[in-house]
Image (tube, rainbow, N blue to C red):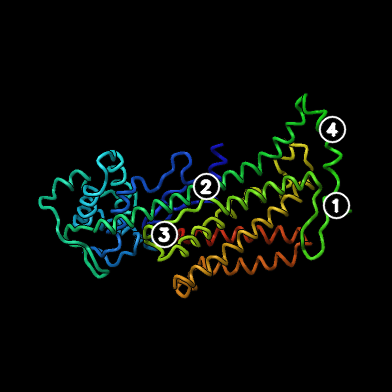
Amino acid sequence: MNLFLSLLAFISVVTATGPVPISKSGLAGINGFYFYDPYCAHGCFRSFSPYTLSCSDTISAGGHITGDEAAHNLALCRASSFPYLSSIAWCIHLYCPDDTRASKIETFWETEITGDAKVLPIWSFGEVMANITVPPTVVAMGQDLVLNSTMLTTEENWQTTWITLYYFFRETALESYYGLSICLTSFGLPLVLTWLGYLPFMTRGISRIRPYLYPSLIGTYHDRSLPFLLGNVPTVGQSGYIFILVALNVIFLSIGYKTLYPDQQMQWYTSRYQELMAYFMWRTGVLAFCNMPVLFLFSSRNNVLLWLTNWSHSTYILMHRWIARLFLLHVLLHSILALVLYQNTGAYTTSLTLNWWIWGCFLVFASALILRQLGEFDYLLVLRLNKIACSQKGNSQTPCTACSR
């Protein structure tokens, strides 16, 4: 089970915020993986991370900087900057609830405060608080501000920051639950259906319904493509498995959304439309990646399910084709939503030169080639594997949309 979770963590990785490459990965909300704990402290960290320090150049919002050397230098600067550390410490003192455990604060302080878990701050949280002799009165405001003394952030800014992280993590956790459910169902259903056939009280019932499961779902077609690229026709029994997977993908793509707007403001987007569009875009991308292990397994000649079930290789190849269509629909929908969202937010022009956007455009083109080659399975398989490899390359060069903010 741990190996399975590790595989899912790799394909649906959620990167923790920081100026360094991925430092935390896993399935959000599963197995104790929470990357904004405590929220109040992360809200303080992000409230001050956009400002320039006296020992640094510029720091982008959220603390993200590209380039390992620049990231390391920034972490060293933060570790020795008392104004930076004291401003965050005083914010934590003001806004974190009294029941927040001191161990959580110290863990956050040692692993997150500099943006690099390997670079520890010179002073602990307690030492910084002990050296704040006069409560700060200056409020940090303005993009050109240099954080050269202990400053305050407004409660409104802190509130908006931490609740944005909370809602982002909520959506990410749902994506983990839904993606894991799809993977477990895809892998587990063939096992369950096969093993049920070996139960004594199921033998007679299965023998009675078996004649109804083998005929083709549509007319005389059997394991061959319909006209107009409508897909391969499964048997009645195979169509039941396909229907369950399609239903799960549609349901998980449609439920569970909750937005900050219109009751509260979100830091990253200016309207409920943009916020909901972002959630929908992220979920289509994650569900596409969560279908990838099934694609790999069902297309393999050494499919372990061939040994554990009584399903034939041709059955798994047919299932592979239908799951590939689901994967393709998720990818195309994700691309369309990203295009619409980035145009709406005004980030489209600046995104055109980024590696992950260029790879995305290439993969959309590759998807069009797939549609033209559905009849050639070997070519389709090679192209799809190349597409997955390219998507991993593109995905590895950028953090998630929210983490770059």
Q: Identify the residue shown where x is 64% and y is 69%.
A: 365
Image x and y of residue 108, in percent:
31, 46
Q: How crowded is mark 1: few (under 14 residues within 10 Å), some or many (20 or more)?
A: some
First of labels 3, 4 by sequence position = 4
Q: Give how far across and how far down residue 374 sits, in percent.
A: 75, 62
Q: How far apart are marks 1 and 2 (CA)?
A: 36 Å
Identified at 10% across, 50% down, the residue is 133
Mark 3 nearby-residue class (10 Å; few <14, some 14–19, many ≥20): some
Q: Which numbered disc covers residue 11?
A: none
Q: Mark 4 points at which residue?
A: 207
Q: How far apart are marks 3 and 1 (CA)?
A: 50 Å
Between disc 4 and disc 2, whose residue precedes?
A: 2
Disc 4 marks a residue whose amino acid type is: Ser
Kind of residue sitting beneath label 3: Tyr
Q: Residue 261 carries which label?
A: 3
Mark 2 and mark 4 in contact (Cβ < 8 Å)? no
Q: Nearer the viewer, residue 147 or 167?
A: 167
